[in-house]
Image (cartoon, helix red, strand yellow):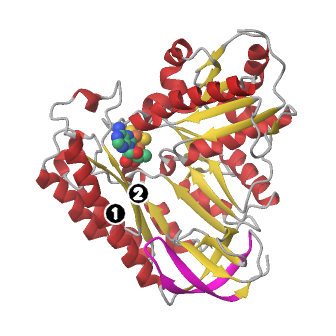
Amino acid sequence: MKPTSAPKTYRVKSFGCQMNVYDGERMAELLGERGIAPAPEGEEADLVILNTCHIREKAAEKVYSDIGRLVKAGNKAGKAPMIAVAGCVAQAEGEEIMARAPAVSIVVGPQAYHRLPEMLDKATNGERATDTDMPAIAKFDALPARKKRGPSAFLTVQEGCDKFCTYCVVPYTRGAEISRPFNHLIAEARKLVETGACEITLLGQNVNAWSGEDDKGRPAGLAGLIHALANIDGLERIRYTTSHPNDMDEALIAAHGEVPKLMPYLHLPVQSGSDRVLKAMNRQHTAESYLRLLEQFRAVRPDIALSGDFIVGFPGETEAEFEDTLRIVDQVGYAHAFSFKYSPRPGTPAATMEGQIAPQIMDERLQRLQARIAHHQFAFNKASVGKTCKVLVERTGRNPGQWLGKSPWLQSVWFEGDYAIGDLVEVTLAEAGPNSLMGQVRATLPA
Ligand code: 5AD
Ligand code: SF4
């Protein structure tokens, strides 16, 4: 590679999960410290970071088509951007990317991006740079302070996974479970609130596995962290995602009844309703134990909105086992859920299991599952009509004077009036659609 001038503008393109969004923001902050500015809308950036996702095959393939597109655009403009590949594809396929895509200057894994500035220097000198080390917690210590974001902010509290579900690449790309220290998290949350956030979503691959010591040196779990965060003035809403059923403890369940700032929403993936499939997935829980757990949440917070993740077409899944999944969807009555076709991931045990399911069967199962989920989502929305709640204004709507925000149950709500992003507006939910609700405004609450 030829030496090049140091980049003055950047664009970060994050794919996949919310943790990638958080990592993308932190990389942007790091570049900002170095005087590199976001590229103006519609202009090519000097540096493009593709912050990739490896969870399913389609997501991973995107990176190569994106690189191709950037090279083409660069050729047309007469100046190729510096390309960095970050995220989980970088971690899993770093060497392959370097071999297959000569236009890539930097490959940086999700635990190493605090070293991006040195890597940029190297790339500017014409050397290619790869860093896929996993120093985990060191990353957070090396990052600059948080900058202004919107009213709703993400905060990574836990990373990695020790569960080794047989279909999943996360334990290999994000590494072992680690928890960030309590004091660091409280400090970062305060900074986010000072810069305008009034809602914080705590992130982790197994967020409810977070553990640490509180400010008095006592052992604390996620519930303890949530209680402490709730004491921050100006922080109005707390959420967390994603949880594993086996990491739930009584204190966290109880917190849903005790902490008004903790929103009535729980994302708790089950993946399948069949015990045989769950065992083959190494989920270490049954459909029944999952349902019992949800009952405990409903006992302390009857209005809680439940959400989950599902995989259809796991190797060996029979029609009857798939119907068990439809049944659990009916039993729970999800307010929202994500569903995916099983995607074999290299290096995971399920990829070489017998009984891989034909694509057309997966398509058909996914359609049936999504129809069932949509039915329950619409039913949940319809049952919300008449409720009065606060909506956090996140953006303007389609028409002038229209605003869009989120209800406590994470539904999209639109309404009209004279407001600003970040306002908490009290509305009565007046009309329900499949994916959103219309609200009627009662009053704007003082910030
Ligand atoms: N194929 C399809 N879906 C997957 N997920 C994780 N790994 C795979 C895979 N190999 C889904 C799970 C998980 C969500 C983040 O992605 O449902 O909860
Ligand atoms: Fe993947 Fe299972 Fe870990 Fe979730 S709990 S990240 S699905 S291995």
Outermost residue, front direction?
76
Closer to the camera in the image, 57 or 302 = 57
Query: What residue do we see at 57% from left, 44% from top?
Result: 19
Reading the image, the residue beneath label 2 is: 268
Residue 168 picture quarter: top left
Query: What residue do we see at 47% from left, 70% from top?
Result: 435
Q: Position of residue 413 (x, y in %)?
A: 57, 75
- Residue type beneath disc 1: Leu
Magenta-span inclusion, residue 272: no
- Residue type beneath disc 2: Leu
Q: Earlier in the sequence, mark 1 or mark 2?
A: 2
Q: Position of residue 174 (x, y in %)?
A: 51, 32
| Marker disc for residue 293 | 1
| Marker disc for residue 446 | none
Q: Main secondary structure of the magenta part?
A: strand
Pointer 2 local density, CA inside 10 Å: few below 14, some 14–19, many at least 20: many
Pointer 1 local density, CA inside 10 Å: few below 14, some 14–19, many at least 20: some
Residue 341 picture quarter: top left
- Is residue 200 visible in the rendered image? The answer is yes
1 and 2 marks in contact (CB < 8 Å)? yes
Numbered range of the magenta stretch: 422-442
